[in-house]
Image (spheres, coloured by chain):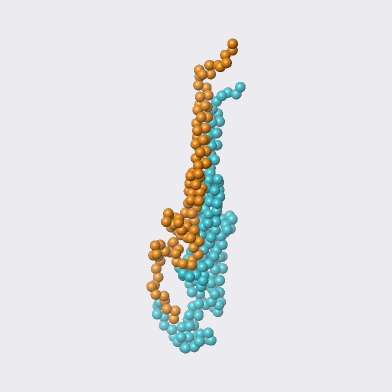
Chain colours: A cyan, B orange
Amino acid sequence: MKEKNNKGQSTIEFILTFTAAVGFIFLFLKMALNYTNGYIVHHATFMASRAYLVGDAEDYSNLSSGDEKAFKLAQSVFSKNLPSALIPNFNGTLKQNNPDSTKFSAFVGVWVEYSQAFSLGFVGGKDQVAYRSESFLGREPTRAESTAQVCQAIASVTGQDPKSGGCSMQATLDDNGG
Amino acid sequence: MEKSFNLGILKNNIGQSAVEYILLLAVISSLSYTFYNNKKFKSFLAGKDGMFATMKKGISYSYRYGVEYSQEVSGSYDEKMQFEYTTNAHDTYVKDGKSRFFTGTDAYPKN
């Protein structure tokens, strides 16, 4: 007959507590990973926003080409700061708040929305949590816009139509420092 | 006549801890089961306004706006998270009708 003893008691207690303990460990581990990923995405968005702030095109004739080029540059900077291997299954896409279409200039910049699972284990569930990273540094006037404004200023002195070569004449302009 | 019950078993304490363990386990298991199946406990943990749901909302909100998720925000949470820049009611930008950002009172003249 098998000897009666208390072997296995600690195993049973271990199994009972292990599941819950591991569940909580995975919950906090995943939350920590989410926070870390969040910081990385915030940094990438901020760097993209900096590029979007100053990005410009060489084409002076088209006023919108500067914004398009700036957004492409911002996307490129975002990708460099957030390589696909860094956050597996990252589902966010960089979007822009263009100065021409954004009602409040305070919100001109770039943002990205993505989602991550809340937890790995059964504690907390695997529901997706939505994150939106925003960086609104604005947009500097493009060279095309500056050219158009200078042309308009010259035309206002010479009295010629800026659309028909009104700024081709040399004129002295005074900057009021504003 | 044979003895139907061996009284010798009562004269030692072999198995006492096992019996106590089983009784304790039964009590703890039944208590845990009762708690786990309790509606209030379930809604506290996993309900629409449960602990984990509140944590998720708080994480999303503070990640976007950089300010703490509070009770006063919870009522307009969906509205806050669906904000698409059509007004100036961005919680980082404006609070109680006032903004910490500033600019000139008059727009700079275009010409």
Residue A149: image x %, image y %? 48, 80
Say above or below: A128 vs B6. below
Please identify the residue farthest to the right as the structure is shown: A1
Q: Of A132 and B30, which appears nearest the observer?
A: B30
Q: Which residue corresponds to the image point at 50% horizontal and 42% vertical from the top-left?
A: B38
Q: Of A55 and A96, which appears nearest the observer?
A: A96
Say above or below: A118 vs A20. below
Query: Is any part of residue B44 visible from this angle?
Result: yes
Residue B58: image x %, image y %? 47, 54
Q: Which residue corresponds to the image point at 51% horizontal and 68% vertical from the top-left?
A: A97
Please identify the residue farthest to the top as the structure is shown: B1
Which quadrant of the rendered structure holds the N terminus of chain A?
top right
Residue A106: image x %, image y %? 45, 68
Q: Of B60 and A112, which appears nearest the observer?
A: B60
Query: Is any part of residue B45 visible from this angle?
Result: no
Residue A52: image x %, image y %? 51, 68
Q: Of A143 and A127, which appears nearest the observer?
A: A127
Say above or below: B4 vs B82. above
Looking at the rendered structure, the number of numbered marks drawn on it comes to 0
Toward which corner of the image does residue A15 lie, by quadrant?
A: top right
Which quadrant of the rendered structure holds the C terminus of chain A?
bottom left
Please identify the residue farthest to the front as the structure is shown: B39
Q: Which residue corresponds to the image point at 52% horizontal and 35% vertical from the top-left?
A: B29
Q: Which residue corresponds to the image point at 48% horizontal and 49% vertical from the top-left?
A: B50
